[in-house]
Image (cartoon, grey):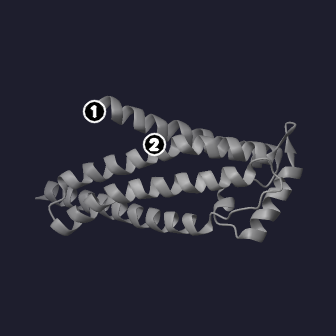
Amino acid sequence: MKILHIFLWTCFATSFIFLAGQEIHIVCFDHVCYHPVILELADYHKLSSILSNWNDTYVHAKSLIHYARINTRVDFIFILGYTGAIIMTSYNLMQGEKNPKWNNLLRLCFPLAVLIGLLDIVENIILLYDMHDYPGDHGLIISLPVSAIKWLLTLFVLAIIIIAAFRRLRFASTKKLN
C-alpha cells in the first residue's frame, strides 16, 4: 500500500511541476499568453478564437497548440495523482475525525474524487479532439459543461478537506493546552 501512495503522490507532484513549469516558461520567458485552463471553460466562439490564435503563435518553432496537446496528455497523469491525493488526504483526515457528520463528508470525498477524475478525462478527450489536426474540417466540441461540473465538485471537495484539516489542527492545539 505504501508503494501505491508513493506512486500516486509522485504522479501528482511531477505532473504538477511539469504543467506549471511549462506554463511559467512560455508566459514568463517567451512573453506569450498561454493558459491551457482557459480552454476548459471557453464557449464555442472563445474556443475557436483561442485555438486559432494558438495555431498562429509559435514558441521555439512549435505552435502553442503543440504545447497544449502535451499539457493535456500529461494531465492524464495529473488526474491519477490528484485523485489519489484527494482520497489519501480524505482518508487520513477521516481517521482522526470524531464528528460523524464530518466523517461522512470526508468519506463522500472518495467517490467525488473518482467522479472529478472521470470528468477530467472526458474533458481532456474533448480538448484533444478539438486540437487534433486543427484547423481541420471537423467541428469543435466545447468542454464547458463537463468542466464547470468538475470545477464545482473540486471546489466542494477542497473546501471539505481544508475545513477538516483546520478542525484537526484546532482540536489538536486545544488538546495540547489541556
Residue count near mark 2 (Cα–Cα under 10 Å), binned few <14, some 14–19, many ≥20: many
Q: Residue 170 at what x, y percent from top left? A: 25, 61
Q: Which quadrant does the C terminus fall into?
A: bottom left
Q: Nearer the viewer, residue 26 or 47?
A: 47
**Residue 122 image-quadrant placement:** bottom right
- Residue 81 image label: 2
- Residue at x 77%, y 42% (from the top left corner): 66
Q: How many discs appear?
A: 2
Q: Nearer the viewer, residue 154 or 111?
A: 111
Q: CA distance from mark 2 to mark 1?
A: 15 Å
Q: Which quadrant does the N terminus fall into?
A: top left
Identify the secondary structure beneath mark 1. loop
Would residue 83 be found to the left or right of residue 134 on screen? left
Any part of residue 119 in sight: yes
Would residue 16 be found to the left or right of residue 142 on screen? left
Q: Residue 18 at what x, y percent from top left? A: 61, 38
Outermost residue toward the left in this view: 178
Any part of residue 24 in sight: no
Q: Nearer the viewer, residue 131 or 12?
A: 131
Outermost residue toward the front in this view: 137
Identify the secondary structure beneath mark 2. helix
- Residue at x 37%, y 60% (from the top left corner): 112
The amino acid marked with disc number 2 is: Gly
Would residue 111 be found to the left or right of residue 26 on screen? left
Would residue 11 be found to the left or right of residue 6 on screen? right
- Residue 1 image label: 1
- Residue at x 44%, y 65% (from the top left corner): 153
**Residue 59 image-quadrant placement:** top right
Q: Residue 156 at what x, y percent from top left? A: 41, 67
Question: Which badge, 2 or 1, is on the more N-terminal residue?
Answer: 1
The amino acid marked with disc number 1 is: Met
- Residue 177 image label: none
